[in-house]
Amino acid sequence: MNTSTRTPAPDRYAVLGHPVEHSQSPFIHAEFARQTGEAIEYGRLLAPLDGFAETVRAFAQSGARGCNVTVPFKFDAFHMAPRHTERAALAQAANVLRFDADGWLADNTDGAGLIRDIETGAGVPLAGQRVLLIGAGGAAAGVLGPLLAAGPAEVVVANRTLGNAQALVERHRGAAGRVALRACPAVDCGAAYGVVINASASSLQGAAVPVADAVIAPGALAIDLMYGTAAQGFLNWATGLGAHGRDGLGMLVEQAAGAFELWRGVRPETAPVLAALAQRLAEAGKR
């Protein structure tokens, strides 16, 4: 009698976005799975700009267990899920969905990933800092709450369309505590910030930095949430003004670790994965 047992198929996950072919998430999650022994399969899914809901529903119905969501669908992902973590509810944007049988769960690990990368990866404590957050879309919405929780002295949200920045600020007013929180137009948002975060679409679009040179304080940390060549314009601008430039690669790995933990119940070590990813991109000439 054959007593052998069949190995269960790995649980399936993917990153959904438009574009998505550049995403390094499959490599990151493969490294996490190897490190932790979790049996997962992780891929990419290109969602049409007018077909995100259909794409993610079909993926879930195929038996998948969850997905990451990238631009420009983070607001859509939030509204598709009947259940939300507290941080996703505050952001009203989600970068992670878990397809639970009793209702999908939406989470947002972007902000926690950014804070961990700034304070641990870059070694810059946020407490007492003056922080400029550029942008008011899904990326900015995902990081503002955790930024406030880190205890800076001030957070200013700058955006080309002032009304969008004001709406984001008002939604977070209750979470600000003692942190001074305000919105301003990108063309006139003050000067000499110790931490400058580009969460706008300017890097992805190859556009000019939308704020004035004066926002960079000497020795400031300037971080772009994009990575590789997309972030290079912002980083060249910032380092040319005396800032320490950092791209979003560390945040990418840290937010992925948060998603992995939500799905699998175990948090992987991020430092070796970040090192492997940086080497991979360097060898490919993308960093």
Image (spheres, grey):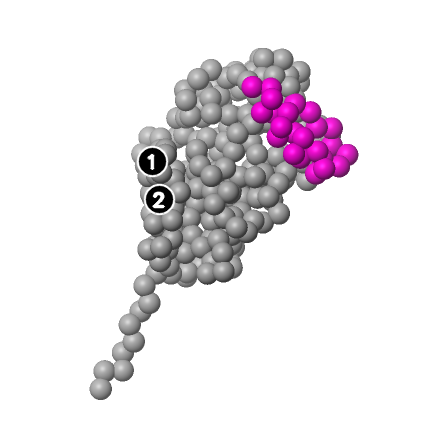
Q: Is residue 172 magenta?
A: yes
Q: Is residue 39 visible?
A: yes
Label 1 to label 2, Cα distance in Å? Answer: 8 Å
In the image, is 168 to the left or to the right of 245? right
Q: Secondary structure at mark 1?
A: loop
Q: Mark number for residue 55?
A: 2
Which image quarter is the N terminus in?
Answer: bottom left
Residue 215 location, x and y as percent? 62, 17
Q: Amino acid at mark 2?
A: Thr
Tell me what residue is drawn at x 36 percent, y 44 percent.
Answer: 54
- Marks counted in the figure total 2
- Decide: is 235 above or below 91: above
Residue 172 location, x and y as percent? 67, 35
Q: Quadrant of residue 91?
A: top right
Residue toward you, 272 or 67: 67
In the image, is 103 to the left or to the right of 19? right
Q: Is residue 218 visible?
A: no
Q: Which residues are magenta?
A: 161-183
Which residue, as the protein is rendered here, is positioned at the far left?
1
Q: Secondary structure at mark 2?
A: helix
Residue toward you, 9 or 17: 17
Q: Are marks 1 and 2 in contact (CB under 8 Å)?
A: yes
Q: Amino acid at mark 1?
A: Pro
| Marks 1 and 2, the one that precedes in the sequence | 1
Tell me what residue is drawn at x 36 percent, y 34 percent.
Answer: 50
Tell me what residue is drawn at x 44 percent, y 17 percent.
Answer: 207
